[in-house]
Amino acid sequence: MSHEGTLLFLIAVLPFVGALLPGLMIRAGRTVCAVSTAVPTLLALIMLLVLAPAVLRGEVVQANIDWLPQLGLSASFFLDGLGLLFAAMILGVGLLITLYARFYLSGDDPMGQFYTYLLLFQGAMLGIVISDNILLLLIFWELTSLSSFLLIGYWKHLPEGRQGARMALAVTGSGGLAMIAGMLILGSVVGSYNLTDILQAGDAIRASEWYLPALILILLGAFTKSAQFPFHFWLPHAMAAPTPVSAYLHSATMVKAGVFLMARMWPALAGTDAWFYIVATTGLITMVIGALIALFKDDLKALLAFSTVSHLGLLTMLLGFGTEAAAVAAVFHIINHLTFKAALFMTAGIVDHETHTRDIKRLGGLRHLMPVTFLIGTVAALSMAGIPLFNGFLSKEMMLEEASHTDWFGSPYAVPILATIGALLSVAYSFRFVSHVFLGPKREDYPNAPHDPPFGMWAAPAILAFLVIVIGVAPFLAEGIVTAAANAITGADLHPHLKIWHGVTPALWMSIVAVLGGAVLLTLHRPLDRAWISAPRPEAKPMFDGLVAALVAASRWITDISHNGAISRYLAIFTITSVLLGFAAYSGSGLAMPTRGLLGVPPVIAVGWIMLIVATVSIVVMHHYRFRALTLLGIIGLSISAGFAYLSAPDLALTQISVETVTIMLLLLALHFLPKVTPKESAIGLRIRDGIIALAAGGGVGSLAYAFMMRDIETISDYHIDNSYEGGGGTNVVNVILVDFRGYDTYGEIIVLGIAGLVIYALMHALLDGPAAKRLKNTDYSQDRSRDRHPLMMVVVTRVLMPIALVVGLYIFLRGHNQPGGGFVAGLVVAIALLMQYMASGFAWTQERKKIEYHTMIGLGVLVAGLTGIGAWLLGQPFLTSAYTYVHLPPIEEFELATAMLFDLGVFLTVLGAVMLMLYSLSRIARFAGETVNVTPMDYDPGGYVTDEEAER
Amino acid sequence: MSWVLSLPLIIPFATAVFAFLLRNSPLGRWTSLVGSSVGLVASIALMSTVLHHQVITGQMGNWPAPFGITLVADLLSAVMVLITAITGIAVAIYALGDIDETRERLGYHALFQVLIAGVTGAFLTGDLFNLYVWFEVMLIASFGLLVLGGSREQIDGGVKYVTLNLISTIMFLTGIGLIYGLTGTLNLADLSGKLDAVENQGLVTVIAMLFMVAFGVKAAVFPLFFWLPASYHTPSFAVSAVFAGLLTKVGVYALIRTFTLLFDGDVGLTHTILLWVAGFTMVTGVLGAAVQNDFRKILSFHIVSQIGYMIMGLALLTPLALLGAVFYLLHHIIVKANLFLIAGVAKQLTGSTELAKIGGLYRSSPLLAALFLIPAFSLAGFPPLSGFWAKYILVKASLDEELWFLAFVALAVGLMTIFSMTKIWAEVFWKAHPDGRQPALSGLVGRTSLIVPIAGLALMTMVVGLMPEPFVTFAEQSAAQLLDPTPYITTVLGPQP
């Protein structure tokens, strides 16, 4: 990169780096804070001035760093005449605003934040005007929206500030999004996102079929940013910001970004009818409407805001004309508008600051009290009105000149007449600004006694007012920069001459009409104002609010329909979606011929099958009666177990039976604490609807199952069967799959089980804290409780069964690797044995005899299984690799030891722990509900029979 | 290679066990934190190995594919594991200041670590049934976290959550059964080839639909997302942050994985449906958010809306679009988890999450305000934050395909997101607290543990935003792997004929 390039890069970066300073420096005082803001700005400005001579000679300074080359983004900057003009404005006015704000902000306002935002904004704005990549430009563009959002809402205690900030962001943000799309299209038409390339490809762009969409999308971005009709409404609401912000963003810089963009894209996009009619017409309308509204605004800043809208319209119109002379006029007016409008905003800020009001109707006669302010304000306002010897006059003349020979849809009069009306209104509100605020008699009822502010506060507007006069008297001083900028816009080699006197031209007559008409209009202001106030007119704010409200209402409607909180509706939507998608996918394709025959149906199986169906249907009918439903559930489970057994899956059958048993037992225990009947919740119509949905879904799944089960396939299970003994050391392939082939799955599943135990425990905890607790406390369960809760017979039987069950469990566990069984089933069997002890003798009694805590048991189980898996690593094998060996221990016959069994032990422990934890949770509920705690094994103690003698002793 | 693959999974499991055994002691939370840190190291090791080898694979139990269970890590899996670990450690730190002792005694840290393990497992598996197992692990752990220490609201949300997710898991299981019935295998790489060979492609598409629905529920896409806004605003903030960041993304990951590797036969139908799903998800989510007036509920609906963008990338199925989807996935996890963490701090400071009842944070906690702006505007797609690139890539991808309306929807939804985020900003930060409270962070440990993860995640958002190049390049390579799964398949199964 050249030295110039490096300098340019530094200019781009400085404000962002500098943004860190004020936030830190505020601790050192307000002046230091302001100075620390001014320093980076001043540095950047000096660097810019170093580059300026070369640019004014027509050279272009470039800097380029790759950022995201895949997507066409690079951090490339270039500085040509247009960029130089804007950069100088941004930095120059930035300095003045920094000075002004130092005195404007009160001690309560967090000044550090203000200056930080200001520098961020400055950096973003600067980035826009020197970007050489449209994506980079977009990034800076959005950054200005963001930083201006923070600035507009700076006075966060004001609701209108917060709303204004959000509105500004919504409008300019949406424009920015449109622009993203537009820029993307432009980039793909040209094949590059480099601005320099794009500007040279103007002909190709205009010839492209995507020209119009790209143009409209990009213009949407420009129009929203530059507050063009009908997007102008956000600007006045952004006036809730502190005045330095208004002066900086909403007169000098940000709102000009849209104008800048149109100027920048001029070589690529301008020169077509579409450009002329869209841009010039929008500008013209905005100019007239803005000026008209401005005339009737009583708030000083609102008046200036609408006048800004109007002047932005003027600039847009000029660029829309698409002629070189119009471009020159636009550039010149950009400079002039900057000087007088920023000065006016600062004047308005001073008036507000001193009198504590911005309402024109409460002001007047200030010239006696604030002579300096009066002088500055008047100079700037006269320039705005376009009075000779002030700079506004010159560019307005050029504008009228261009307007006077512009044809609009074949009419030579439309544009000149409307332009004159715009100028006339502009004169009227400018005069009003002077006469209603400063002239007239001195009043006694200002909210605060005004006087001129300290020098620091009026210095900045004074400098601008000085410029207004200098350029107005000696316009040739601006010729260099105007030429450079205009050449950069048009790509032509122009040599405009800026003069005070152009001779007697149509523009002069239009000007005279405007000034005289404006003066007349002002004298009629009072009756006109009354008419304006009483006349119905569309107000943008309520319309925008209404739009937002309508959008929210529509959203609420949509959300409420789909999201009413009823789980049945969610399930219905889910099921319908699945069925529809399934049908959509299947429709059209046929089903291949079945390659398997149907198995025969022996009578026993048919009976079982019918039982299953009857039980299932009954459960649907009777699900309101919990106990019956539970019984039916048992039938279904057992039928399924039988089905597994019939289909040669003894492992599954065994597992299913034990799971079924444990589940039903636990559910029975839980049932006790539930209301006996659930309320019927849905109406008959809904139930029919749900029935149809359910049948469709069931039918779908059924037919799918049929389609798949009738076909032969090759599966990986053949490998499992072949390798079960040799590789896994077990002849029960199901168990070897569980603990070895797919031990990893099992590992996951035991964790699920363990966590389930935990979750139930946690849920119980929550329940006993919640509203259900009240019901439990208040229900009397003693009525339906047996007199003999722990009957002798049951206690005896379960005690006898206990060791047997334990041995069976051990047996099932040990044989698992070769015969149906394994850790899972063994865990359940032992759990059942323990469950029975609890049922027989009550929880407390059994609990006392428990040695290991259930939580720990779960943890241990997972740990053992995990360690088994990790053990394989020590031998350099993958996780869960198993090993086995045969051990001969006399007098037992030779048996096999496999690491898989250790894994299975983990499974066993986890299952046992989880089930017991669930039981424990239930018993907590029971005790909470007032069940008495027994410490003896049974209510009637046979050993407790005591003779009288013993009793006496 | 196997231990590199299994460690990111074993570590959280081991941590879970120890944290569980120590649940009644203050050591439990530190165990969790240490475990998360070690897990992060392990996932970094995995990432660097994968960067070197592109795809790595390991066979559990040393049984060869497709007979044993395969673990595979390609670029997408590895980076998802890494980001899971990052989210995990952020939330583990945050939990020090957010989770009370009651929840700890009920096993919060164990549940949390199991959740992380489940998510990691889902990203790493190369086996369809194993994926189901991890879904179950996630489901039960997340349900536990959801109802832990529960209020009535939590239980209500938890029931909806678990019901709908269980149904979707059943759907998933049905799909697995059917696909096994069709091909006789469960290994993803194996399935990829065998599904193409099935003569009746109609049945394959039907199964594809079942998976689309099952994963669609998990990913919370239109019209299956109801469980999410019904439950995500109820649990503790650390929990909802990890949910918001990771859970739905597992669904998105599963969709991306299966609909690039397995179901690419009838793209005309499946991916067109996904395209519509994407559009509706974006719109309904953001509209739902516009209605809400609660910090966390707004964020919850935005999860849905953002999922739409990722699905959009998958549905377009171009290299650029998939790149966008991957990038979006990564960006969104960080941003969304962070927003929920911030909401938690806001709740601690102001006493509520209802916008009308809170405020004043800008004045009293400017640091928090600044930290909110970063993820909030990143979510909305403001440059130069990560979300801008994510949205930009997807919009460009849809414009390249000349899908104007979709591009418009994507941009408009971005605008609506700005609307929501500025609503939160104006109400929670700018506006004064209605009680006149001056909420300020207090307590050294609480302050650090809450702010450090937020600041860290915000920093990552900034880094991705300012230096997107390496991340985009990575996403590009990852997308290329997804579009051409040959290396994936050959690594798992060996050279194919």
Image (spheres, grey):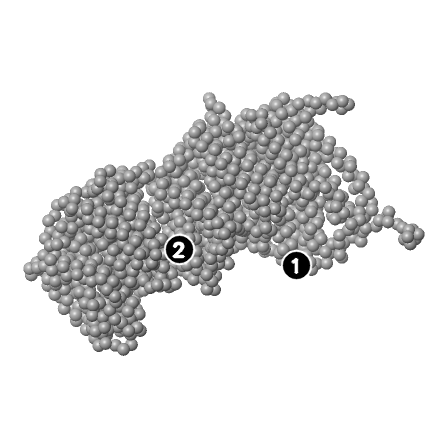
Amino acid type, callout 2:
Thr
Task: Tell me which amino acid carries mark 1.
Answer: Lys
| Dot label at residue B239 | none
Along the viewing direction, whichever of B380 and A149 lies nearer the viewer: A149
Estimate the x, y position of residue B275 in percent, counting from the top left.
42, 42
| Chain of the residue under label 2 | B
Q: Secondary structure at mark 2?
A: helix
The reply, left or right, for residue A726 in relation to residue B299 is right
A253 lies above or below A574: below
Is residue A693 visible in this depiction of the protein?
A: no
Image location (x, y in percent) of residue A509:
10, 63
* Circle number at residue B422: 2
Q: Circle 1 is placed at which residue position? A: A774
| x 42%, y 39%: residue | B326
Q: Residue at x 45, y 60 (%)?
A: B359
Kindly check if marks 1 and 2 are in contact, taking CB atoms under 8 A apart as contact. no
Q: Quadrant of residue B136?
A: top right
The residue lying at 67 percent from left, 33 percent from top is A905
Splitting the image into 4 quarters, where does residue B403 fall? top left
Q: Position of residue A572 (x, y in %)?
A: 54, 48
- Image location of residue A913, percent across then percent down: 67, 41
SS assignment at label 1:
helix
